[in-house]
Amino acid sequence: MRPIHEIIKERPWLGWVLFIGTAVIVFMLGLLASSVVERRAEAIFAYTPQLTFPQFEPDNAVWGEYFPRQYESYLRTSQTDFRSRHGGSVLVDMLEEYPAFVILWAGYPFSIDYRQGRGHYYAMEDLYNSLRPGSPGPGKPSPLPNTCWTCKSSDVPGLMNEIGIAEFYRGTWDTKGSRVVNPMGCVDCHDSRTMNLTITRPALVEAFESMGKDITRATHQEMRSLVCAQCHVEYYFNDQIEEGVQYLVLPWRDGLSVEDIEYYFDSMEFSDWTHGLSRAPLLKAQHPDYEIYLTGTHAARGVSCADCHMPFISEGGLKFTDHHMQSPLNNITNSCQVCHREDTERLLKDVYSRQDKIHESRKVLEDNLVRAHIEAQKAWELGATEEEMEEILYDIRSAQWRWDFAAAGHGNSFHSPVETGRIISLGIGIAQEARIKLARVLASYGYIGEVPLPDISTKAKAQSYIGLDMERKEAEKKVFLEEVLPQWLRGEEDDR
């Protein structure tokens, strides 16, 4: 082969071609290197800025100055226009949709008002607007303990750090209302110095300790679910730990299954309330999302809550977590289809099929429980004794616990349809046993045949049947929003 310099001598224009080509290549490599350096610098600024705000800063907008992409996506949590077949971000009056709930919760505040929450952005607002707290009378404190604030506000971590855990739980929520005003946000899940995921609610740490586990050994992927488990769990208020304190406890000592938690409550003879019709000592499940999630196929494969509800997105060459916490069904491309290659229509059909089947079974359990409560009410009217009713009331308690455990976790029918179906089917069997025993008691008092059901086809009719004065409740809410709440937020005493 002839040397290149001889070829260039014969064809001098070829040298210019090589020169220009080399220059273009060097220029393009320079642009690429500059882009890489720029993106690396941008990433460093975006993810590890030098923070100057306080450790427990509760205002999300302050965090947003340093993490604009995450904050902008969080603000989209304010959108309330998505509704799937069984969920979404729309504010739904669940008692209007399921009037039977009123009967199942007779004697408990949820029979007054129960609405599907709109998400973290509205955590405080939705609590204020609920009819459940009512309004205190002249000189009377709010009926709800400060413990209720725990999973509603980003002000909680700082306040707990300042005054102590037990002191935060002490008293009623009017006493700290002026200091708990921001909705859930950044500080609830992130260490403000390292930006690592962190646990800010001591109840979860204490629950792990009760099981002999160390939560500090959790992996980063596990933490992407555990920060959610700070609130999306079953819990209760224990007033036996310290006098005057409604201490928040997750009942996980014996395990996280519906049977384990039931055993925990039974062993301490605990009940949330006595039913207004049947007099059964009942348990109210809160929202055992994490407990049910752990039994599902996604958890078994290492998929975290954030993978589906806060998937990664890319913007301007950066990859970050979408803080628009929402139903995956409103973001199928970034959530479901990262792993599942089916088209959107097929994925939706699959999800709805599972949910529909669970809801169909749950309705059977609800109907049996409604009848059991009303039949028990009839037995008491006929003169049934405590001894005759004891076993029946425990069956009603056990069956309703399973119904509520399945129903209270809004995503249960998807997170773990097999376990949710198992829980409901066991509940149906227990409820039917209770009704058989009730039939025998009724027969012993000369009542043969079916106990007629009242007309509970609407929320209003069901509430009227259990004796609720909803006009008074609405009037109380008006007083609370217009007079009492503004005083609390200003930190003023109620001197009415």
Image (cartoon, rainbow, N blue to C red):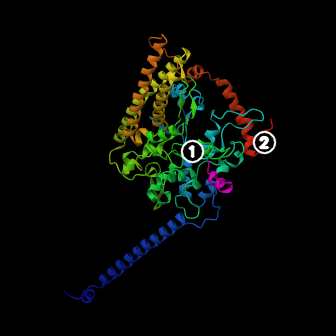
Mark 2 belongs to which amino acid?
Answer: Glu
Q: Nearer the viewer, residue 402 or 493?
A: 402
The picture places residue 20, in percent across and down from the top left corner, at 36, 79
Q: Residue furthest front?
A: 387
Residue at 48% x, 38% y is: 262
Mark 1 belongs to which amino acid?
Answer: Ser
Question: For the magenta stretch, what is the residue range?
Answer: 153-165
Give the class, few, some or many, for how many residues have Cα within 10 Å of label 2's Cα (few <14, many ≥20). Answer: few
- The main secondary structure of the magenta stretch is helix
Give me the disc on residue 78.
Answer: 1
Give the class, few, some or many, for how many residues have Cα within 10 Å of label 1's Cα (few <14, many ≥20). Answer: some
Residue at 48% x, 69% y is: 40
Foreground: disc 2 or disc 1: 2
Q: Nearer the viewer, residue 241 or 349?
A: 241
The picture places residue 435, in percent across and down from the top left corner, at 44, 21
Q: Is residue 54 left or right of residue 205?
A: right
The picture places residue 41, in percent across and down from the top left corner, at 51, 69
Give me the disc on residue 113.
Answer: none
Task: Please say whether residue 351 is one of the residues in the magenta stretch.
Answer: no
The picture places residue 227, in percent across and down from the top left corner, at 51, 52
- The image quadrant where one finds the C terminus is top right
Tell me: residue 183, above or below residue 143.
below
User: Is disc 2 in contact with disc 1, using a CB cutoff of under 8 Å?
Assistant: no
Tell me: residue 368, above or below residue 131.
above
Q: Nearer the viewer, residue 434 or 175?
A: 434
Give the residue pinned by disc 2. Answer: 493
**First reached walking from the N terminus: tag 2 or tag 1:** 1
